[in-house]
Amino acid sequence: MAEVTIRMGGGQGGVRGKNSKLIAARERQAMSDGEPMQPQDVAEAMNVFLWAEHQRNPKSPEPTILDHRFVLAYEAGRYWWPSAHYRAAFRHVLDVATDAELGFTPKRRRRRGLHAPANSADVNPLAEFADKADDAQGDVDDVKNRFQEQALRRHIITSPDDHPVVVDGQGSAAHGDRRLGIEDTVNPGSAETDLVDFASILDQRGISNSELTAVELACQRLDQEFARTSPDELISKIRMLMKLVTNHLRQPQTLSHHERLVRLAARVAGLRAWACFDINDHHAADRWYDAAVTVAQDSKAWGLGAWLLGAQSLIPWHRREMRRAAALIERGIYFASQGTDATTRAWLYALQARANAGKGDGEGFDSAHARAQREAEESNERDRRHGMDFTNGSLDLRYYAGTSRLLLRQPGQAYTDLTGSLNALPKTHTKARAVLSLFLADAAAQSGDTAQARDLTLRALASTIEQPILPIFQQSRRVHRLVQQQDPASAATLIDAVQNFGTALTAVASKATS
């Protein structure tokens, strides 16, 4: 039987060898942890760029999900002239000005003997015709590229050892240097035996539906109790839940149960990341978020991935690294565009509005906040995840609006929003109420009322000394600095309380990580 095989190396005339320029350009770009970008990092950043371009220009090609294999195909030299929109994405992500810097060259042949010398005033009409023919060939190459890139995305799958496996038109595969035909994949035996084997593989019993539902509900309760539980206790519970989930993932499961367990693991990892952030372990938090986002993307859990990216953006936002925060939020919005609920979309737009405010972009804040309000009208409490507060059945955006207006130096409007949000919070949410009180103290300090700023800060620190978290400590230090600039005597009464809270946070962090 003749084989029809899509070869990764044959797309544009054979393999030319590794694209060292593309590899070098990728390795020059550093991630937040200082490590060079990996192919998956490049692919994800290209996805965000292409989606943003499509939002700006709906006539541009509609983006599809790229992953590390797409980038590796070009790095390996199997393809060397991407379509125009992919070249633009590569240039943007890898911060270069020209395609040549990335080793991208079109397949165009020049006719020898047709071109006049550089110093000649005569124009050879045959050379001019040849140039036009070459340009036309370049256009044909672009069309071919689109078909080849579609084939690359459609036919590359991943083998257990994560090497590319290329599926041919007859259903066989090329793995490494060896072709696997149908005769290699069928076990001897009767058709009835084959059917039993097939059914038994798909019908792995594993965890029962009721037990899996109970584990999912345990995760949901942990999420709901997050705001009123100390960080060390949280991390202890999260570790236990993660161990339970991963133990089940190591065992045979039905396909549907395995998918639910994978998504559950990603959500638990997200809660672990948030808990690490609360105890000032940003490095661990970023690593947990990165792992969880990868799982969510691979399982196409777009809503979960969108929430994870929004949560991760809080790390650079608290460091006032607005550019990185905005990039994570933009990626989260891209995930949300692939399919999620209105609650998550509204939350992400509220985060985007605040990031714009942090950059001093008042118009950007107004635009994103308006989108958040529209989405919040369709929000539902059943879609709530940690970081989202509800009032009267709808997502409450006033905390994010208030903190945004503080960044825009609008303390009066901020005070109104923050007060409304604080009044809507349950009394049991001690940590969240303390955070809101400290932002109210910030608004008071900006308005010149240092006495109120001092009193609000002291109450917030006293109420959470047994449950210390980084956002409270960080904001209390900021309020102390603002009060110090206006009223050194009031600031002196804050210093001991702030330092004692920092000591308590260090002790809890040590206990949580021991």
Image: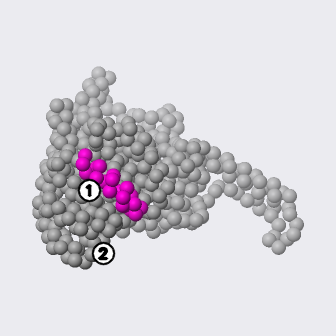
Examine the rendered structure and indicate whether residue 370 appears above or below residue 284.
above
Q: What's the residue at 64%, 49% (across, down)?
A: 141
Mark 2 lies on residue: 486
Q: What's the residue at 56%, 63% (across, down)?
A: 103
Residue 312 in view, yes or no:
no
Classify mark 1: residues with Cα within 10 Å, few (<14), some (14-19) or many (20+): many
Q: What's the residue at 32%, 23% (across, down)?
A: 191
- Any mark on residue 243, and which? none
Residue 278 image point, x, y percent? 22, 59
- Rounded to the nearest angstrom, the CA distance separating label 1 from label 2 is 22 Å
Give the main secondary structure of the magenta stretch.
Answer: helix
Classify mark 2: residues with Cα within 10 Å, few (<14), some (14-19) or many (20+): some
- The part of the chain drawn in magenta is 404-424
State the image quarter where residue 32 is shown. Answer: bottom left
Residue 409 image point, x, y percent? 40, 63
- Any mark on residue 436, and which? 1
User: Nearest the camera: 305 or 359?
Assistant: 359
Residue 395 image point, x, y percent? 32, 42
Counting residues from the start of the chain, the first of labels 1 and 2 encountered is 1
User: Nearest the camera: 91 or 136?
Assistant: 91
Magenta stretch contains residue 407:
yes
User: Nearest the camera: 429 or 278?
Assistant: 429
State the image quarter where residue 447 is shown. Answer: bottom left
State the image quarter where residue 275 is shown. Answer: bottom left
